[in-house]
Image (cartoon, rainbow, N blue to C red):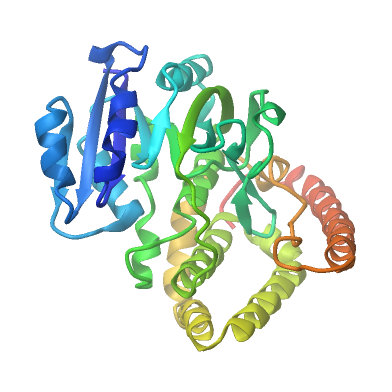
Amino acid sequence: MLASIIIIAHNAAGHLDDCLGSLFRQTFPAGEFEVIWVDSRSTDGSAATVRERYPAVRLLELGENLGYRRGTNAGAALARGRYLVVLNQDTRLDREWLARLVSAAEADSGVGIVAPKILMFDQPETVNEAGNTLHFSGLYGSRGLGEPSSAYDRPETLATMAGCSFLIRRALWRRLEGFSDDFDQLDIGWHSSYEDVDLAWRAQLLGFRVVFEPRAVMYHKYTSKGLADFRFGSYEWGRALVVARNYHLHTLILLSPLLAAIEAGSWLYALAKGRSSLEAKSRATGWLLTHPGALRRMRRRVQAERALPDRPIIERMSPRIGVTHVLSGGRGPSLAQRALDLTFMAYYRFLLGALALIEGTKSPSAG
C-alpha cells in the first residue's frame, strides 16, 4: 500500500461529504491507499455516520479530544502505507491531489515532505496556504495567504509546510517519532502549535527536503482564529521550544540579540492583550528558565541526529516578517514594514555569512 491518509476529526458532520466524498473520487488507485479517521470524542454523531456511509474507512474513536498533534500520532500508529498524508476534516480535494503528492515524493528520494497547494473553499482562486513561511527568528505564518493561486504555480523547496495537509514518508515519520512529545512538557491544553514546523525542521536536519507541489490542489474551509489567549500561549511555547532545540549552539549565540528583541516584543504584546496573555507567556518562559536540564536533554536528542548544518536550512527561511496586519492607519504600517525589512535582511545576511565561516570549518556535530 502506498498511502495512508490520516484525518483528525471532531464534530465533523458538516464536512463528511466534501472531505470523504472527494477522497473516494481520487484518480489514485483505490487499493493503493487507506483512510484512517481519528475521531476525537465527537458529540454530533459523525463517527457513526462515517461507520455507516463510508465502510472502507478505518475508524479510530478516541476516548477524549487529544487535539491535532496527539491525535495524528495515534492515527499514524495504525498506518500501513509507504507515505502518510495528514489531512484536516474541513477540506475538499481535487481528483489529482493524492496522485500528485505521491508522485512528487516518488520522483526524488531526497524529498521527505510534500506540501500541497491549499486554496480557499469559497474563493477557489485564492491561496490559503502554499506551504508555510518560517522566519529565521522562529516566527511562522501562512505562505501566500490571500494571494492569487496563479502566483504559486512552480514547485519549490520550502522551510516548512502547513499542518492542514502534507505528505511525509512513513519511514521518516517513524525515525522522527512523529510529532514530538517534547511539547507535552508544558500542559497548554489540547491545542498545540509548531508541531508541524518542528517536524519539517527535524526532517531537514536529517538531510531531507520539504517541497511544494502546486499541482496537488485542495480547498480548505479556512477561518482566521487570530491569537486568542490560549493560542498565544501555545504559539509562544512552541516557538521557544523549536528554536532552542533545533538550532546549533553557535547559531543560537549569533541570533541571541535578535531573539532577545523578539522576546521583548512578545512581552509587550502580552502586556497589551491583558492578564490571560501575560499568564500564558509567563508559563512558557517560566518552564524554560526552571527546566534547563530537560531542555539540554531535548537538545542532545535532536542534535545527535543532525546530518546537515544550519546554513542550508536557514537559506530556505524568510528574512521578512509582515506587520501590516497588526498595525493600521496612515503611513505607519508601510514605513514600519520597510524599516523591519531592511533590519531583518541585514541580520539575515550577517547570519548566513557568519555561518559560512563557522560551518565551513566545522563538522555538523551536536552543539
Q: Hey, which quadrant is residue 26 in on the image?
A: top left
> 352 or 286: which is nearer to us?
286
Q: Residue at x 26, y 18 (%)?
A: 1
Q: Hey, which quadrant is residue 48 in on the image?
A: top left
Q: Residue at x 27, y 36 (%)?
A: 16
Q: Could you tell me residue 238's position as x and y percent? A: 49, 63
Query: Going by the image, does 174 lie left or right of 49?
Result: right
Q: Could you tell me residue 282's position as x and y percent? A: 51, 84
- Residue 190 visible at all: yes
Q: Could you tell me residue 367's position as x and y percent? A: 59, 58
In the rendered image of this protein, does residue 188 appear above or below residue 217? below
Name of the residue lying farthest toward the front:
122
Q: Residue at x 27, y 39 (%)?
A: 76
In the rendered image of this protein, does residue 275 appear above or below residue 185? below
Q: Residue at x 85, y 56 (%)?
A: 341
Q: Could you tell me residue 274's position as x and y percent? A: 56, 86
- Residue 129 visible at all: no
